Amino acid sequence: SVLFIHDLETGQNFPLFDQLSKDQQEAWAIFGVYTGFDWTPDDKHIVIWGQGKIWKVETATGKAEEIPFEARAKHRFQETIHFENKAFQEQFTVNVIRHAVTSPDEKMLVFSAVGYLWKKTLPDGKPVRLTDGADFEFEPSFSPDGKEIAYVSWNDENMGAIWRLNLASGQKRKLTAEKGIYRTPAFSPDGKRIVYQKEGGNSHQGYAFCKEPGIYTMPAEGGEAKLVTPQGEFPLFNKDGSRIFYQKGGFIFGSLTKSYHSIKTDGSDDQKLCESKYAQRFVPSPDNNWIAWSELYKAYIAPMPMAGKTVGLSATTKILPVAQVARDAAINLHWSKDSKKLFWMLGDELFSDELAERFKFLEGSRDSLPPMDSAGLHVGLELPYDKPQGALAFTNARIITMEGDEVIEKGTIVVEDNRITRVGEAVKVRIPNNAKVIDCEGKTIMPGLVDVHGHLGDFRYGLSPQKSWYYYANLAYGVTTAHDPSSNSEMIFSHSEMIKAGTMVGPRLYSTGTILYGADGDFKAVINNLEDARSAIRRTKAYGAFSVKSYNQPRREQRQQVLQAARELGILVVPEGGSFFYHNMSMVADGHTGVEHNIPVAPLYDDVIQFWSKTKTHNTPTLIVNYGSINGEYYWYQNTNVWEKERLLSFTPRAVVDARARHRTMVPDEEYQNGHILTSQSLKKLQDAGVNINLGSHGQLQGLGAHWELWMLRQGGMSNHQALKCATINGAKYLGMDSQIGSLKPGKLADLIVLDENPLEDIQNSESIRYIMVNGRLYDAATMNEIGNYDKKRSQFFFELEGSGNAWPLMTEGQGLMPAQCGCRK
C-alpha cells in the first residue's frame, strides 16, 4: 500500500509514502480499506498510521517523521467459555431421531436412527430394531390400516430401493426393480398405491441410475411406475387419492421462498396452493382441512389454503388464523389419523399438540389456551459405543507424545481395546502376551490430528451413504477428530451417532450443527433478546451439540446474548470471524471460546498481542482460506502436483481434484509472503504470548488440506513441534476433550498415526502416514482396510464402481467446478 497525492487540476497521481501496512482491499472492508488519515491545518503534512506507528509525512518531499505515541488502556474481559466434553462413553443416548411417524392408532412410533429402522411402543416401550438387514433404512410411512410400512433402503454398491414391511410377521418385499435413490414413499388413502420421489443424484451417493428424477406413483404391490411431475419433493396423496400434494424449493438450505402444490395423478392441473418465505417443510392433515409447516425452525398450523389462488403463508399471515405449536424447533411433522393432533420431534423427544389447544374457535377448545410444551416424550434409545477388543503393541518407534516437549526416541505404545495402557522406552514397557506386535523401527508415532474447523460435506439434506468419502479421506490423512462448525444438524449429528455405534467409519465427529446465522436465509437465526438466544441453543443442543457457531450476528449485543445463553446451557461458542477486525477484538473481550478464521489485519502488533494474551480465547486461523489475501491453498496447488497423489485419489472423486489441481492459479511468491505467511508470522507471536492456535482445514481438500494448514503454521516461524501441537493437543483443549484425546498417555483414548518419516525433521513428513488408529481400530492408510486385530476390507465408493465415469456429474453440482450450462446472458 502506498500513499499518493492526487492533483485535482491535472488528474496526475504521485507516490508520496510507501511505509504503510497492508491494506484491506482483499478483505470484506466494511470499515474501509485503510485507517483514517488527514492533512495538517497548514496543508504541508499528512498524518497517517503505518507499520504500527503514526507518521507525519511532508507533502512536498515525502519525508516522514515518526510521531511518538503510547497509550495505556484498561479493558474488561469476560471469562472465556470453556466446558469439558467426553470423546467416549461406554453408552450413549441417540439424540437424532429421523423420519419419525406415529401409527394410525397412536400406539407405536417408527423411526430411523444410526442408519436403521426402529419401533417404540408408546408411551413406555423400549425401542427395538424392525429388521436385521445390513442396508441402511430410512423414511418409513404407515399403510392406512397401520399393519404395514413402506420405507426406502440404501446400499453404497447396490443403491436404493422401496420396500414394504408387514409389522406383525416381519416379512418384507422389495417393490422397485430398478436401482436408484428413492425417497419418501407414502400410501394412498385406500392403500392400493404408493407415491414417492426419485432423486437425480448427488456427490455422496453418486449419479448412476439417477436419470429421469421426479415424483412417481406405482401399485402398492409393486409394478410399473408412472411419472407425475419431474420436479418437487415430499409427495403425499390427497384425502381421496385423486391428487398429489408436493413441495418445491427444497428443504432447509433450499430456496428462500418455497411453494406447496397440488397436481392430478396423471400430471395435469398443477396448482400452487401457497408459498412461504423462510418455510422449510409443509405437511397437510389427512382430511386436507389443515396445514402444518416449519418456518425458521419453529412449527405452525393454519387452515389449508384451498381457495383457488396462491396464498402467502407465514407466522405473521393475517388472511388465515395461524398458531405456533413448537417452542424451539420441530422436525418430522406428521398428523394423527383424525387430523386433530400434530406430532413432531426435537432431538429424542416426541411432542404433540391438539388443534383445540391452539384455536379458540374450534369445538371443544378452551377459553384460555395452554402454553406450548417445553418437554416431550423421550424415545430412550441407548446404544453401546463401538469399541474393538484385543491388544496391540507398537514397538521401537519414535514417539511424539504431545505431553509437553516429550519425545521418546525408541519407544513402545500398548493399546488395549480402545485405550492406551502403556507408553515409554521400549526396554521398559511390558507387552501383554495376547498383544499383536507391530514393529515400527524407523517410524514415528504421534497423536491423530484434531481438525476443529473442517467442513465435511454435511451441509445438505437427504439419505446417508454407508460410507462418506469425506470421512475416509480425512481418516486416511490422519484426522482422527473433526469438528464441523457449519452443517445441517440432522445430517451431521446422525452421522456422528453412526460412527459412535459403528455403523459408519470416520473420525470422531462433532459439530455446531446449523449455524446461528445473522444474515438472510431459510436457516437464519433471529436473535433479538436473551430468550431468542436460549431457544436457538436449546434446539441445537437437543441434537447432541456441545458447541454453537454465532455467525455474522451483526450487533455486539446479539453476540453477547448468545454467550449468556451458552453459559447457562453449558455450550461452547465458536464465532465466525468474518474478516472484521473490530468484531474479532470484541469477540475476544466478551469471552468466546475461540475466533474462527484469521484476523484480517497483518501483521499484528504488540497491542493486539497483549490484549489477546490476557484471555483464554483460542484462534483457528484457517490459513488455507486466509482472510485479507489470496487463499493459502493456492500455494500448494501452485507448488505441488496434487493430481498425482494416489492416496488422495483413492478417497476423493477425480473430478474434485482435477478441476482445482490441473488448472491452477499461479501468482508471484511475494503474494504468499504478503498473504498467509505474513498472517502465520502473527500467529507465531500469539502462540508465544500464550494464545492457543488450533488447526482448521475448512474442508477445502478433505484430509490433505489439514496437512497444508499444518505446514502453513510452520511457514510463519513456529517450530515443527509447536505446529504439531496446534494440530493435536491445542484442538483437544479447544473442544474440552484434552483429558481423553490430543496426546499419547496411559488412560487416554487410542487415537494415533504411524508415520514413515519424522515430522520433527521436516514438517511435510506429516503426510507420510502408514497407519491410522481411531478409538483403538487400526486402518491401513493406503486402502483404509481395517487391520491389526481385525481384517475387514472396505467396500467400494460410488466413484469406484463400473460405469461411474469416476463421478463426472460432480461437474454439474457444485464443488467449485464448472456449471452445467452456459452462464452467458441470453
Image (cartoon, grey):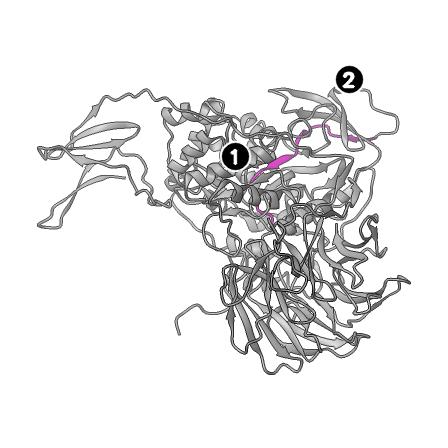
Measuring from the top left, give residue 30's x and y in whole percent.
34, 45
Tell me which residue sits at (65%, 32%) in the image: 85
Q: The N terminus appears in which quarter of the rendering?
A: top left
Q: Is 591 on the left-hand or right-hand side of 115?
A: left
- The residue at which mark 1 appears reads as 564
Q: Farthest residue in the right direction? A: 169
Q: Farthest residue in the front direction? A: 367
- The residue at which mark 2 appears reads as 427
Q: Nearer the viewer, residue 43 or 636?
A: 43
Q: Are marks 1 and 2 in contact (CB under 8 Å)?
A: no
Asked if the stretch drawn in magenta spans residue 419, the answer is no
Query: Which of disc 2 and disc 1 is earlier in sequence?
Result: 2
- Badge 2, how many Cα within 10 Å: few under 14, some, many 20+? few
Measuring from the top left, give residue 352's x and y in whole percent.
69, 55
Front of the two marks 1 and 2: 1
Q: Is 346 on the left-hand or right-hand side of 25?
A: right
* Total numbered badges shown on the rendered structure: 2
Asked if the stretch drawn in magenta spans residue 449, the answer is yes
- 112 versus 762 height, above or below: below
Measuring from the top left, give residue 301's x and y in whole percent.
60, 61
Q: Nearer the viewer, residue 127 or 305?
A: 305
Q: Nearer the viewer, residue 427 or 110?
A: 110
Tell me which residue sits at (36%, 25%) in the image: 607
Q: The C terminus appears in which quarter of the rendering?
A: bottom left
CA distance separating discs 1 and 2? 52 Å
Q: Which mark is residue 350?
A: none
- The answer to whether residue 711 is visible is no
- 431 versus 108 height, above or below: above
Q: Which residues are magenta?
A: 436-456
Measuring from the top left, give residue 345's x and y in whole percent.
68, 53
Q: Is 567 on the left-hand or right-hand side of 609?
A: right
Q: Name the secondary structure under disc 1.
A: helix
